[in-house]
Amino acid sequence: MKIDSIILDVDGTIWNTTGIVASAWNKVIDENFPQVSHVTADILKGQFGKTMDVIADNLFGVLSTEEKKLLMEKCCIEEQKALLSNTENITYKGVIKTLQKLSKRVPLFIVSNCQKGYIELVIEKNGITDLIKDFECFGNNGNSKDENIRLIVKRNGLENPVYVGDTQGDYEACIKAGVPFVWAAYGFGCPNDDKYFAKLEEFAQLEELLP
């Protein structure tokens, strides 16, 4: 297959924010709902990739539906502040340089289950605004990841895209969307079988998949 485009996941694929996000969320939890258990980076690694409502159900189970929604909204606001002020490089090895090289060969896109505004923060913070041709997320339209992958494919007329992600959820979304899955094995999770299109031990190996 001659790959004509690459669609990227964010957390566990481009960068690892879990330590920063855990601290931000715990601050909000203490200030608003101290009965909720603190989160850790490892706990978040097991949750990232899910939609925000599912994460809230999984982590804030002692709260009512409205309280979960409120807490998640406050957590996302504090998370964005923390990430904007962060000066540490939290991208995975070689990601930015590789994206710069890849963008000269094929168009690049992002699809995530994140909140509205998060992808914009990612591309601004990492200086890759000009490299990403289009993006979509759960927070924008409430669609599942497979639906948003299909939306990006249709909206941009892609014929042979691949999706790069790191979790079973990413893999399942690709199966539903009919897009080959490239497993970022350095990330947060793994697919339940080995029927993925390719496996990356580090991000720079993406270059090897292109003709």
Image (spheres, rainbow, N blue to C red):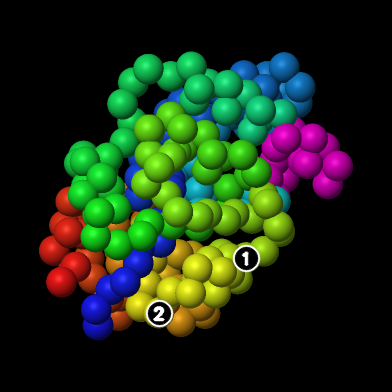
Identify the residue at horizontal 45%, vertical 64% (top origin). 170
Give coordinates of residue 149: x percent, y percent: 52, 68
- Say which element carries label 1: loop
For label 1, the crowd category at 10 Å Cα-Cα, with few meaning under 14, some 14 to 19 and many 20 or more, is some
Which residue is denoted by mark 1 in the rendering? 144
Q: Which quadrant: the C terminus?
A: bottom left
Q: What is the three-letter code of the residue carrying label 2?
A: Glu
Identify the residue at horizontal 28%, vertical 48% (top origin). 99
Give coordinates of residue 176: x percent, y percent: 52, 79
Q: Which residues are magenta?
A: 55-73
Identify the residue at horizontal 29%, vertical 53% (top origin). 103
- Judge whether residue 92 can be spotted in this image: no
- Which numbered circle lies on residue 159? 2
User: Which one is in front in this view, the residue at disc 2 or the one at disc 1?
Assistant: 2
Give coordinates of residue 117: x percent, y percent: 61, 39
Residue nearer the viewer, 154 or 47: 154
Q: What is the three-letter code of the residue carrying label 1?
A: Ser
Residue nearer the viewer, 108 or 80: 108
In the image, is 64 to the left or to the right of 158?
Answer: right
From this view, report whether residue 60 is shown above or below residue 208. above
In the image, is 14 to the left or to the right of 25?
Answer: left
- Which numbered circle lies on residue 197? none
- Say which element carries label 2: loop
Res 184 → quadrant: bottom left
Identify the residue at horizontal 50%, vertical 48% (top origin). 48
From this view, report whether residue 59 is shown above or below residue 190. above
For label 2, the crowd category at 10 Å Cα-Cα, with few meaning under 14, some 14 to 19 and many 20 or more, is few
- Judge whether residue 81 can be spotted in this image: yes
State yes or no: discs 2 and 1 in contact (Cβ < 8 Å): no
Q: CA distance from mark 2 to mark 1?
A: 21 Å
Res 190 → quadrant: bottom left
